[in-house]
Image (cartoon, helix red, strand yellow):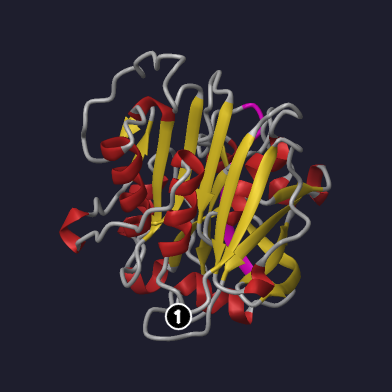
Amino acid sequence: MTTTTNAYVASLPMVLTEVEVSHVERVSPSYVRLELGGSGLAECGRSGPLLDQRMKIVFPNAAGALPSFAGMDSSWWDTWLAIPEDERGSIRTYTVRDLVGSGVDTRIVVDVVVHDPDEHSGPGNDWALQASVGDRVIVLAPRLGHEFGGIEWSPGSASRLLLVGDETAVPAIRGILRDLPDDASGAAFLEVPFADDVQRDVVAPDGVEITWIPRGDAMRGASLHAAVVAWLTGAAAAAPTVGDDEVDPDLWETPVYSSSGEEVAAATQVPADTPHAGLYAWIAGESKVVTGLRRRLVNELGVDRGQVAFMGYWREGVAMRS
């Protein structure tokens, strides 16, 4: 297997290398688990817990070839975009489920959400459905000793935690739950397509209640929204209707960043006698569902923006760019 070990790559604050599939498993109707390995991963990792650590995978182009990253530096994104579209392949973002092994034997474990191919099938879905041992992709992942970013979990001194997501956010949520302190308390709500997608092996502190919501034929996010509002207020509420023009195409709102250009200020001090004092919410998934939850929490329930992270991981019917 060829690995990317050029000097320019060694100087980057991230691991950028070609890897090979060493294991592939269809763990449930909606998830394919992959192990990716290669000597270029020897420096992959981070000093702290993985939590919701993101990474990127570059998939082969239609001819099955991977692009060359020769000559790329810190401006790798612009350089990659300059490669003709039919040659550069596609890039998508995933969560690092786990890092196993060490040194040149390090492997990245990734759970990829899949569905039966249809008119909305993307390159990640198509590739994962057919992946086999020996297939190759390129990864961009954290490098030990460098700040890579890609972690949004930042609860500060919050005493009550709320994690919410659909099937695309399950890998991140389970990573956060695994790495929480033993005395953490709160709740996690995870919506998945089918009952067989429920992951019974999730590790979490005893004080964090986990609720799985198989969607089945129900409207996406409807039961999830109702369950979250019921946990916050004691009474369920229907999800609002969110129009196409109401969704920020780059929806990413955290206590320190706003994709909409909104001014971000330090969170106000929430009075201790309010229902939401001490709350920190992390919400990710389909953009319309996330937008509806943001509207409910911030605009209607008065949750301070500094207490929440809302992330549109994808948008139904719209092809992702990365």
Is 203 one of the magenta-colored residues?
no
- Which image quarter: residue 86? bottom left
Is 142 one of the magenta-colored residues?
yes
Of residues 31 and 224, the one nearer the viewer is 224
Of residues 237 and 288, the one nearer the viewer is 237
Q: Give the magenta-colored segment's residue range.
A: 136-145
Residue found at x 40% / y 72% = 219
Asked whether the viewer can see residue 199, the reply is: yes
Tell me if residue 70 comes above or below residue 177 in the rendering.
Answer: below
Name the residue carrying label 1: 62
- Which image quarter: residue 109? bottom right
Where does the image place residue 253, in percent across and percent down from the top left? 34, 38
Residue found at x 20% / y 62% = 244
Q: Main secondary structure of the magenta part?
A: strand
The secondary element bearing badge 1 is classed as loop
Where does the image place residue 47, in percent across and percent down from the top left? 69, 28
Q: Amino acid at mark 1?
A: Ala
Residue found at x 21% / y 35% = 261
